Amino acid sequence: MSEIAQPASLALAVSRPRSPPFDWRRAVPFLLAAPLLLYMVVLYALPVVAMLLRSVNDPTWTLANYATLLDDVVFQKTFWITINTSVTVTLGCLILGYPVAMGLVRARSMAPFILVIILLPFWTSVLVRSYAWMVLLGRHGLVNEALLALGMIDRPIRILNTPLATQIAMIHILLPYMILPIANALRQIDPSLIRAASGLGSTPFMTFRQVILPLSMSGVAAGTLLTFVLALGFYITPAMVGGPRDITLSMLIAQQVDQLNWAYAATLSAVLLATALAILAVARKLPGVGNAFKTSMR
Amino acid sequence: MSSAGTNGAGSGKGASVTLSNLEKTYDRASAAAKAVDGVSLDIRSGEFLTMLGPSGSGKTTTLMMIAGFETPTAGDIAIDGKSVVAMPPYRRNIGMVFQNYALFPHLTVEENVGFPLKQRGVPKAERARLVAEALELVHLPGYGARYPRQLSGGQQQRVAVARAVVFKPRLLLMDEPLGALDKQLRENLQLEMRRLHADLGITFIYVTHDQEEALTMSDRIAVMNDGKVAQVGTPEDLYDRPENRFVAGFIGESNFLPAVVRGVENDVVIAECDGALIRALCPGRPSSGEKVTLTTRPERLRFADSTWIGEQMPQNRLSVTVTEAVFAGERCRYMLQAGDGTSIVLKEPSSAAIRRRAVGERAEIAWSVADTILV
Ligand SMILES: Nc1ncnc2c1ncn2[C@@H]1O[C@H](COP(=O)(O)OP(=O)(O)OP(=O)(O)O)[C@@H](O)[C@H]1O
Ligand SMILES: [Mg+2]
């Protein structure tokens, strides 16, 4: 093959002019994207950079803000809580979301109905949903009433303002971000593969483990990343339904801004951003996830 | 799983399959639209049976019911005499090759071929040996570490076949396994399928809509039409003795002559067609005066004034006018018209020694009683 390809490519190189005249058609995509690009740079990128800069130049150029984090007990506890919450919520979304994604893909006439239920949270604001959870999880909320009625508890238990409440509410809000990428991956599995597996002697469970699960890993990876990175930055929900001492990074940042502690807030923001970027960077290197990135770019 | 391995019930290495009054309706609301409508077939142990039919005739549906991916609406499927209707596909121990091959994209060739063995708990070392053997069988040794996407269409097809036979099933189902390949490759692989069938000695049920493929490969062909079996028989049976107009028209080219029955002599019907008395083979006993259709193949007709060296001019004759004459290399193809307007095709082997007929010329054609069938 290479013997044939060589002369052809040589001929091509010779016949091609050195510097092609400027082709306006190539500029069209950039021109189309220009308004949004400008908007993003002026109103988003510049303020973010300006904010982040305050972590190193307020009042003078220094890395002292970062150095102090190393033995800042409040920061470390907050960071740990944030990571812990995000991991728990992501796992919860995965365990609850995967079967739903499968149901969504398998359901025929029910599919639009299931999709609406999944997407419903998308169409209501986070604030409204968090209030709803306050009502549900409160001392005299629906959950406590139900548990009492079932005789599973004999006096109302405390759910609201605990880490559990944060986790429940966040899982509810983030579930679509897990379900949709997984459902998308599942939908792309050729149904004849599942028939083939069954015909070759694979029980439904073995088919799930050896065919469906591996072929949906790109969706699982995408959903997990999306959910985890979004969970890292959650603010309203943990603030409203979480425990008073269970402060996440976002809450700490808001608190510091309130106290006009700009340099410290900027430092924490930089850490939060760096964590998210680091996770994305590491995830890209994992085999299955890398492919997920590539296919979603296509 | 008593049917696993090579020691199932029945004789020989191949399973016998019996379909009795098999029916399938996908849409229960409109029971009229039966995808498969009363199919009964006896497939013998070790046979190469092909289901041939036009698109939508129910071939795939029948195959899917045998494999267990679809449940029959009515009727029964017995493999080696035992009904399998209630058995899930993964317990039927049937090899299957899909039209798009259905290779697992996340597994290597070796893992794909080893897949059915793994499901059966075959130990790793044994598995490797059987996989190598199967890849050898389809002439693909040394490709084990590749992924399906790194193979050509023909190679993928071979992997699919290796995977379907590696666990030594007694029955192999194939749904248009060569449909996606070009003509040259398809012809090579047709020969390999025959060889494989001879080597393995197991029962093959093969689906195609390519009649040439069916005629060259099969022991017997079941012609399907509209969810029903139109005729089952050897390729010669179907070509020389079609039982109905559909089979006569679907397999090869046929002329259809409208006629009226005038009498019956032994197995031969005498019918009047455009004023001439034509004799035809007929298994039944049509009554005098009945309107019937006679069929005959274009290449079995000859012009009556040809030289008949060492043979008698056949009994059936008809006067015609040439309406079209086409030279097609090895053959000349003539469109003829009988006095009653019936169009007839005649194919004559071409030879520089034979006079070519001109359009508008009147002629008499002749053909033998054995090549005339009442359908
Ligand atoms: N899953 C299904 N749901 C509803 N109808 C179906 C389904 N599969 C097949 N049919 C219908 O059943 C009939 C037979 O289809 P089948 O696929 O068995 O035909 P086929 O002989 O394999 O045709 P082809 O040569 O095109 O593959 C067709 O009318 C088809 O529309
Ligand atoms: Mg089909």
Image (cartoon, helix red, strand yellow):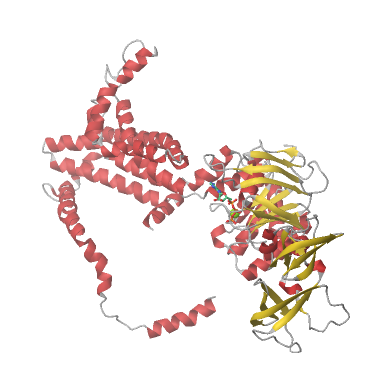
Q: Residue at x 72, y 55 (%)?
A: B231
Given residues B296 and B98, the one toward you in this image is: B296
Residue B68 visible to an observer of this rendering: no
Residue B50 visible to an observer of this rendering: yes
Q: Where does residue B188 sit, x and y in percent of width and height? A: 68, 68
Q: Residue furthest top?
A: A154
Q: Quadrant of ligand 2?
A: bottom right
Q: Residue at x 14, y 38 (%)?
A: A257
Residue A231: quarter of image: top left
Residue B80 shown left or right of residue A234 in the figure: right
Given residues A10 and A74, the one toward you in this image is: A10
B38 vs A130: above or below: below
Q: Where does residue A113 sit, x and y in percent of width and height? A: 38, 37
Given residues B204 and B327, the one toward you in this image is: B327
Q: Residue at x 21, y 34 (%)?
A: A251
Residue B279: quarter of image: bottom right
B333 vs A119: above or below: below
Q: Where does residue B355 sit, x and y in percent of width and height? A: 73, 88
Residue B9: quarter of image: top right
B154 vs B63: above or below: below
Quarter of the picture holding the N terminus of chain B: top right
Q: Where does residue B129 sit, x and y in percent of width and height? A: 71, 52
